[in-house]
Image: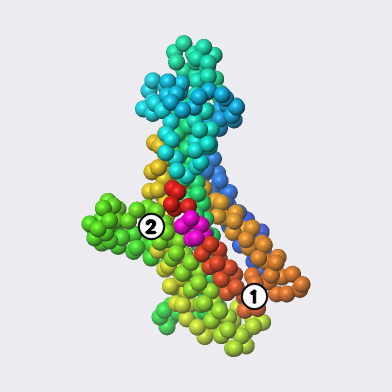
Amino acid sequence: MSIGTGFVRPCSIIFGADQLGKKENQRLLDSYFNWYYASTGISTILAVTVIVYIQDRYGLLQAVVAVFRKRNTRLPLTDCDDYYHSPLESEILTPSNDFSLLACDFIVCLNRACVIEDPQRDLNPDGSASNPWSLCSVEQVESLKALIRVLPMWSTGFMIFVAISQFSSVLQAKTMDRHIFPHFEIPAASFSVFMIIALTIWITFYDRVLVPLLSKYTGQPRGLSPVIRMGIGLIVTCMSMALSAITESIRRQRAIEEGHEDDPSALVNMSAMWLMPHYALLGVAEAAHAVGQIEFYSLLPKSMSSMASAMYTVGTAVSSLVVSILVSGVDWLSSTGGKTSWLSSNINKGHLDYYFWLLTFLSLLNFFYFLVICPVI
């Protein structure tokens, strides 16, 4: 599998990029990369969730259909544990009622899916459901509740992936002095390595230094709870985007002052090392949020472990779609009336700094959204 993937993926992305490789197609090329990774993520999602789960036992969809079919049931839905369908091998006998994220009426509505209305009609002689699309098990209902519960928190990770998916920093680096030694310069596309380095350093530092110290005071075996680490990642993302906007504003101003407004390929008298803090903060943000988010998925039952492992990939796929829509929308709106687009291929005439400020604002809104949903998780 590794060998096959190694042959296919590097070639397929380059073949597509070669067809769009003209300079005037830069925005289209950026959109292509986003859609490529989105399709990769979606294919992975289908492989490890939908296909596996349908093959296993149809899944959560049965619970949704059963809830809809029993929306008008008149059976008493309190103190009726004997009416809940639970297979002999199941460890969950009755549905929970402490689901704080949703209103009580909706919890009761979900619980209807596993209520036995007529034992003669709904059950086979061996106790199994005669029609799994009308009567599902308590375990299936609880799996559906767990999935709904983590969806709001999962959605907060989109903005981090949106920030990471930006290719504009490569364009910035191309116009800056990338030398770290007199005869050696870092390739513009290699600056993202600083994000990986920061991510690795942070994870190591947190695991080996902070966890033993923090666990003594917080009582958490991992130092900080997954939710707090996710919040740290979100606020660091805001800082990274703001820093990137400030850096681009300085770079653009210097380019204009040096007379390079009409020459986007001209080198500005400014070190590309100014981009390092932006990448470093993004690495810390991804490390804090991604690991916390993956640990947060422990709320899902073991029967949904495959779906839990795929939700991170789902986030990257959705974020790639969001980036494509956002880039297209900003380019269209900012170029109306014959004005130069913020995302012009000539970054000295465009306003990447405005675009980064927009991402900063959206990241801040996302953080406030995170704070709102935290108390009800």
Q: In this view, does 316 lie to the left or right of 345?
A: left
Q: Is residue 280 left or right of residue 223?
A: right
Residue 198 visible in the snapshot:
yes
51 part of magenta stretch: no
Mark linked to residue 350 = 1
Numbered range of the magenta stretch:
366-372
The x, y position of residue 293, in whole percent, is: 42, 51
Compared to 252, does 37 lie above or below? above
Judging by the rendered image, the residue that carries numbered circle 2 is 229
Judging from the image, what secondary structure is the residue with disc 2 in? helix
Q: In this view, does 228 lie to the left or right of 251?
A: left
| Residue at left offset 44%, top offset 77% | 273
Compared to 178, does 285 lie above or below? above
Residue furthest toward the right? 337
The type of colouring in the image is: rainbow
Compared to 210, does 239 lie above or below? below
